[in-house]
Image (cartoon, coloured by chain):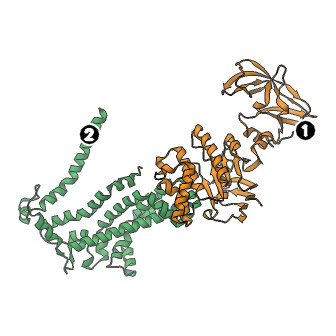
Chain colours: A green, B orange
Amino acid sequence: MIRYFSSNFSHLILLIGIFIMIIPVWLIFASSTHTALIINTQGLQFFLGDKFLENYTKVLLYEGGFFKEITVLKMFLNSFLMATGVAFLSVISSLMTAYVLVYFRVKYATLLFWIIFITILVPLELRIFPTYSVMSTLNLVNSYWGLIIPISASAIATLFFRQFYKTIPDELLESAKLDGANTWRFFIDFLVPLSKTMIVAMFIFMFVFGYNQYLWPILVTSSEQYWTVVMGLKMMSGSIVNKFAFVIMSMIPPVLIIIVLQKYFIKGIFQDK
Amino acid sequence: MSFLELNKVTKIYPNGTKAVHETSMNVENGEFMVFVGPSGCGKSTLLRMIAGLEDITEGYINLDGILINKVDPSDRDVAMVFQNYALYPHMNVYNNLAYGLKNRGISKEDIEKKVNEAAKLLQISEYLQRKPSMLSGGQRQRVAMGRAIVRNPKIFLFDEPLSNLDAKLRIQMRLEIKKLQQKVGVTSIFVTHDQVEAMTLADRLAVINNGLIEQLGTPIEIYNNPKSMFVAGFIGSPQMNFLEGELINKTLTSEGFEINNVTSDFNGPVILGIRPEHMSQTDKGLINLSVDLVEQLGSDNLIYGEIKNKKDFCFRCPGSQIIKKGSKLSLNINDNNYYVFDKSNGNRVN
Ligand SMILES: Nc1ncnc2c1ncn2[C@@H]1O[C@H](COP(=O)(O)OP(=O)(O)O)[C@@H](O)[C@H]1O
Ligand SMILES: [Mg+2]
């Protein structure tokens, strides 16, 4: 009886939470299906209008920027490239960093790890000038690599992989060694498949992180053709309903990736078998 | 030249722990060698040095005529079964067995043949597609054995592989390991702290204490002729009784009785060792035991009691003999089956 009550109660709290989070999104979505006139005169709308197709097609083909070098479609492509690149590189780099820290006889491995971890306290925004100067020396300003590389080393992901590796019993490595697995094979045949769910979780994490970047892309690209969705949101001119439609569309990629991979995401974060 | 030769092998861990001291021994081809000793005596360390999982601080190890000190574990051609099996959790049983073969570049058809053979031998054929998490303890044990057998290595190394099984299964697997080893004839080293396991499995066994081999020999040699008090106390169940005494001019005085014509020139304080099964009841015996406790095992009775100053003295008699708590027994030692140890260092002196 108590159990029943408390489960109902927690559901109630969850429902309230969902409600609070979903309402603004719904308002924007509903409003994005009306004409600009209605929004401007009557404010945000709670119910759907009939201009869905019209508004959304217009946005997709919208040419942004001063030089009209970019369409919203291209922005999505840029964002996708950037987010995927960041996710791939951070997962690979932190998988390998954790491997080295845990399995190689590195002197002061713990100290090194904490130094890496401290970088969490120094986000990109704080080190943006030195980072820019490095990118510019490497001639990577105005390129996809310039967008991706500086945010592709994740201390958090390294932490997750490191903690996970530390729970793997030594006998597994020893057994693999006796079975003829070298350093590389142990990584590929054991650590990677064993951390599969965590890899997916970190991939999602870093994808969303990369997708949401704003300040860095603005700084490192001057050419309009590298605009991302988040930059476009800010820069876009046009009617209010089109902006709303763009906001809604901009949510789709991260939401989609979470829905598709959520099974792994939960497993990876909480490591239940 | 022996198949496996250890020459003054020493292990000192980075933190300064000296786990193995100048150990030398030879293991012959096809032999089943058991390392037995209490926990922490260095058995695993010795085994792991043979496997290549620990560096050898000093000394040499030769396997099949090759000095392996610096040979990588993957190139030593040894197989090891671990206490917790160390199965690959993400691979099914088939791939657990096949993995070592794949790494050795064996063709797919040959791998399949070898895996199926090993699986049949171990009766795990029907589980080949299962993940280790879906197997019982005994089945996992078999898979671990299969992984060792399938590679047909130069030597099997077992590190207390049975200690995670329940008592009944342990006895069954013990038997199977022995049969299997005799069938495939691969040289084996088996580490255990269980002396019954050691006695039943070994062709020869090494009793290890504090990083040193105290005695090396066949189980029966060691049981009949322990060289030290430690070995005498460790091998044999229930444990040998130890009584304080004094040996002067071949006459041993202890806890209210005397033994004459002891075959020893030693004079001084000694420890007298008598195995519980080496005594029998008579009318006017040497030892008078007042019974405190009777353990009936069915086939045998274990009688515990007091003789003069010594408590918990154990005597073993056939289960058919009915002995009551509180009764007094008179015991004789059969056929001079007693052991005399120098009290100062535990060395055998008779
Ligand atoms: N990695 C290690 N570092 C330091 N000391 C160790 C290590 N492994 C084992 N020892 C020590 O070496 C001794 C022998 O250990 P071990 O060979 O595991 O004993 P056994 O297998 O006989 O129980 C013990 O005193 C143990 O504490
Ligand atoms: Mg051990």
Badge 2, how many Cα within 10 Å: few under 14, some, many 20+? few
Identify the secondary structure beneath mark 2: helix
Question: Residue B186's x, y, as percent?
Answer: 67, 55
Q: Is residue A145 above or below residue B122?
A: below
- Residue at x 86% of width, y 26% of height: B257
- Type of amino acid under label 2: Phe
* Chain of the residue where label 2 is placed in the rendered structure: A
* Label disc, if present, on residue B264 of the rendered structure: 1
- Residue at x 35% of width, y 72% of height: A148
* Label disc, if present, on residue A172 of the rendered structure: none
Q: Nearer the viewer, residue A220 or B265?
A: B265
- Type of amino acid under label 1: Ser
* Alpha-carbon span between mark 2 and mark 1: 85 Å
* Label disc, if present, on residue A9 of the rendered structure: 2
Q: Which quadrant, please, contains the C terminus of chain B?
A: top right
Q: Which quadrant, please, contains the N terminus of chain B?
A: bottom right
Is the CB–ligand 1 distance for label 2 below 8 Å?
A: no
Identify the secondary structure beneath mark 1: loop
Badge 1, how many Cα within 10 Å: few under 14, some, many 20+? some
In this orientation, does residue B222 appear? yes
Is there one chain holding both mark 2 and mark 1?
no
B330 horizontally vs A269: left or right: right
Question: Residue B204's x, y, as percent?
Answer: 74, 48
Q: Nearer the viewer, residue B69 or B123?
A: B123
**Hey, which quadrant is residue B52 in on the image?**
bottom right
In this orientation, does residue A127 appear? no
- Residue at x 46% of width, y 53% of height: B129
- Residue at x 6% of width, y 59% of height: A42
Looking at the image, which residue sits at the far right?
B249
